[in-house]
Image (tube, coloured by chain):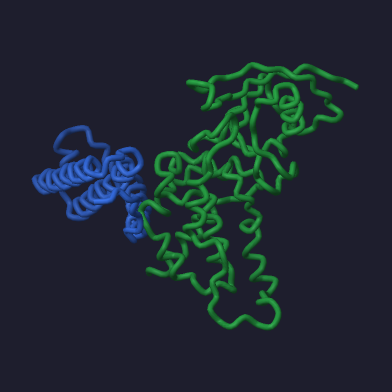
Chain colours: A blue, B green
Amino acid sequence: MVNRIVVGAHYGLKDWIIQRATAIIMALYTVLFLAVVGAVGPDTFEAWRGIFAGGFMKFMTFLFFISLFYHAWIGVRDIWMDYAKPDGLRLILMIATAAVLVGYAGWAVQILWRM
Amino acid sequence: MATRNMQFKIYRYDPDKDNAPYMQDISVEVDDATDRKLLDVLTKLKAKDDTLSYRRSCREGICGSDAMNINGKNGLACLTEIKDLKEPVVLRPLPGLPVIRDLIVDMTQFFKQYHSIKPYLINDTPPPERERLQSPEDREELNGLYECILCACCSTSCPSFWWNPDKFVGPAGLLNAYRFIADTRDQATNERLDNLEDPYRLFRCHTIMNCVDVCPKGLNPTRAIGKIKEMMVRRAV
């Protein structure tokens, strides 16, 4: 195979928009989270648990984690694209990143719906 | 006339003679009345040591030949005021490009990226008898874009261009890409956007804004890149 520089994958816009959208979702959730914690003032494990027991807070927290993982996927992938030069290494790092983030997402769901 | 001695530290490298680049300490008599710009003093330095190599041509910020790294910041020697420079003045070639000799860099990669955006008007309709006219409002869109002199100060100050000069178009190329996208006489907007919609060609820009900081013509490549993304969003949603 000739070792030619190839570019033109024709994607990137969707990720760029999603990165911005997820940033807004995380910012809004941060405000919501601080407001709820400020209002409830949880001092026991049960009180903390109570915050996340309701459907709304579960939904919002789930949305936050999904946003965080997608945002992290784009950001970390960008780091690999910037700095990891061998194509094979970059592919391995991307797969590893995606695997870890999907695992984290499942773990987050398990923790949230256990409460 | 008031003259003073000015200290310089200049990156020197002659691949025919030197094993490795080194910094040369050199001083020169500067006359504040006549030596206004860094290029004036470089001319004096060249007279003192004629092995010193740098590019220059118009000496008034139009040709973009004398771009170099001046006290850590890219700029044009001909537009840099001598009185604003802190001593010793450290001169290095533009970062990230292969050095040919001293302050002269190989700009092949830079121009390759520039050519990749098709920097010319594409319009397949038969040309009118005289020129293709624009309204003053449409012409206004090109201000802040057409002034680019391709000195490479911006692209060589961009970390994304340092890491991927072969794949990322770079701020200069993208500013010029938008210059033709914004031109109402150009008909290839869609093809131009297709050509740029790529994780490397356009989306390596992380809005670091070094390009805006260094542009000797006061242009804003980051804003042009933002406008390209905005057009892609408008096209997609």
Q: Quadrant of the N terminus of chain B?
A: top right
Which residue is located at x 12 percent, y 47 percent?
A: A106
Nearer-the-camera pick, A108 or A97: A97
Corner quadrant of residue A107? top left
Residue B117 versus residue A52: which sits nearer the camera? B117
Q: Is residue A51 visible?
A: no
Tell me: B147 left or right of A73.
right
Q: Nearer the viewer, residue B58 or B225?
A: B58
- B13, A45: nearer the viewer: B13
The x and y percentages for residue B218 are 65, 47
Residue B15's place in the image compared with A71, above or below, is: above
Q: Residue at x 73, y 34 (%)?
A: B39
**Whole-percent x and y of residue A75?**
32, 44
Tell me what residue is drawn at x 72 percent, y 38 percent.
B78
Q: Position of residue A102 (x, y in %)?
A: 16, 47
The answer to whether residue B182 is seen in the rendering is yes
In the rendering, at what x and y percent does residue A22 appear? Answer: 32, 52
